[in-house]
Image (cartoon, rainbow, N blue to C red):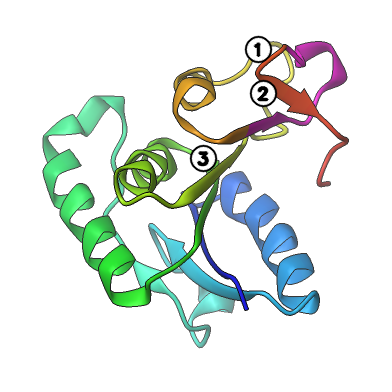
Amino acid sequence: MKKILAIASTGGHNVQLALIRDALSSKGFDVIKVRTKVTVDEKDDEYYLIDEISRSNLLYAPIVIQQIIKILVETKVDVVLSTGALPGLVAIICGRIFSKKTIWVDSIANSRKVSLSGRIAEYIAHHTFTQWADLETEKIKYYGSIL
């Protein structure tokens, strides 16, 4: 059975990832959950918690890199999947370094252009997806939206 590390930042990124995780779990995949914060309704769920990083606090990037590497080593996943944001991109990069298959799904909130992390992921991830047909490119594919 394939093990998938599913990682997202809080908010809409995590809501979209939860839908993907549920679909993957229902198909028999072993989904390892990683998030940057825990919300009240997710408290009892099994997950790995990592620190949040963004462009405004890049000084924490080494800590997040260390946390993600520890999770990759401990879980021995086959695939790294993210709906964003920067912590997910870091996981995609670490996944590539560890020879894992990588998938980036850009947030549905990015309707006018692909996010900065998504534009970077398009060159790093094995597969990059958008949820808007008009944002599809040769490297970023559209197959519909999650929500």
Q: Which amino acid does label 1 sit on?
A: Lys
Does 58 sit left or right of 72 as displayed?
left
Q: Which residue sits at x=73%, y=67%?
A: 24
Residue 142 picture location, percent across and down: 81, 27
Q: Picture coordinates of residue 90 (x, y %)?
A: 33, 40
Q: Does the magenta stretch include residue 133?
A: yes
Which of pointers 3 and 2 lies earlier in the amino acid sequence?
Answer: 3
- Which label belongs to residue 38? none
| Residue 100 % position (x, y) | 43, 52
- Residue that numbered label 3 is attached to: 84
Between residues 73 and 146, which one lies in front from this camera angle?
Answer: 73
- Which corner quadrant of the image does residue 41 belong to? bottom right
The structure residue drawn at horizontal position 21% and vertical position 48%, both measured from the top left corner, is 65
The answer to whether the residue labelled 3 contacts the one labelled 1, judged by CB atoms less than 8 Å apart, is no
Q: In the rendered structure, are the residues bearing label 2 and label 1 in contact, judged by CB atoms less than 8 Å apart?
A: yes
Amino acid type at mark 3: Gly
Magenta highlight range: 128-137
Tag of residue 113: 1
Disc 3 or 1, which lies upstream in sequence?
3
Q: How far apart are marks 3 and 2 (CA)?
A: 11 Å
Name the residue type under label 2. Answer: Asn
In the structure shown, which secondary structural element does the residue marked by tag 1 occupy? loop
**Mark number, residue 110:** 2
Quadrant of res 138: top right
